[in-house]
Amino acid sequence: MRVALAQILATDDPAENLELVRDHAALAAQQGATVVVFPEATMCRFGVSLKPVAEPVDGPWAGEIRRIAEQHGVLVVAGMFTPTDDGRVTNTLLVTGRGVDTAYDKIHLYDAFGFAESDTVAPGAKPLTVTVDGTTLGLATCYDIRFPELFRALADQGATVTLLPASWGAGPGKVEQWQLLVRARALDATTFVLAADQADPASRGIDAGKAPRGVGHSLAASPFGVTLDELGAEPGLLVVDVDPEQIPDVRAALPVLANRRL
């Protein structure tokens, strides 16, 4: 399976961000990718009010994502925001294309390092896997990476590859935490973890303020926790090949899922 991680720098304009999706999906398809993963908050960057831009998953913004996926024959995963009944929004991954059309709502909200995502975002409750071209993919979002039980639950549901869109908060040691956590979740769930972060605004001379705007360093980790490839801080497209058929041999050699006692 060839997967493209689109490390974009989203703006506060959903229409502009659709053009980024359109361009990167086309480039990924030209390079043979069948899955294209965009970051969390692809619809609209963090740091602005999200309620005015939130739309349901059957709304016009999501409809354009579906058309892009269909046009290029790829599965697109992209972060958006959907309205809720309590005045907040839901941090949602739209997952569409290649016979799939569903969405994952971020379970673990980023109430850490002085940021309170739950003030404006309502949590999801249900893990999600999808099957594309015979491969079961798990879905997770950003702060979810700090919770190994979710990644193991996805593995229990058959995931051999987990896709992780993010808009990671910057700060001392945060790039190193990001890299470590992606590799660790791959290792302790014995799955590939393919993580697409927003590019670092500082790489374009933009002050991100206190909002989690991304640090770049999108990366692919093997089920043995080895970094297969990684981008830097600037916008870019990372195309990687993964072989889910390796997973049974990995789990035979390192049966951490089978050996669990708790």
Image: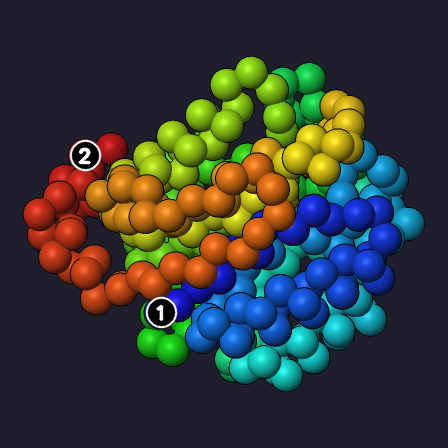
Judge by depth and name the residue closer to the eye, 204 or 8: 204
Judge by depth and name the residue closer to the eye, 113 or 128: 113
86 versus 14 height, above or below: above
Q: Which mark is residue 261?
A: 2
Judge by depth and name the residue closer to the eye, 142 or 26: 26
Q: Label 2, secondary structure: give it.
A: loop
Residue at 51% across, 39% down: 232
Q: Label 1, secondary structure: give it.
A: loop
The residue that label 1 is drawn on is: 1
Residue at 34% across, 76% down: 134
Residue at 47% across, 37% down: 145
Residue 9 relative to residue 6: left or right: right
Tell me the colour scheme of the image.
rainbow
Location of residue 109 by image quarter? top right
Can residue 183 be spotted in the picture? Answer: yes
Residue type at tag 1: Met
Residue type at tag 2: Arg
Q: Quadrant of the C terminus?
A: top left
Residue 186, percent from left and from top: 32, 43
209 versus 189 height, above or below: above
Can residue 147 be spotted in the picture? Answer: no
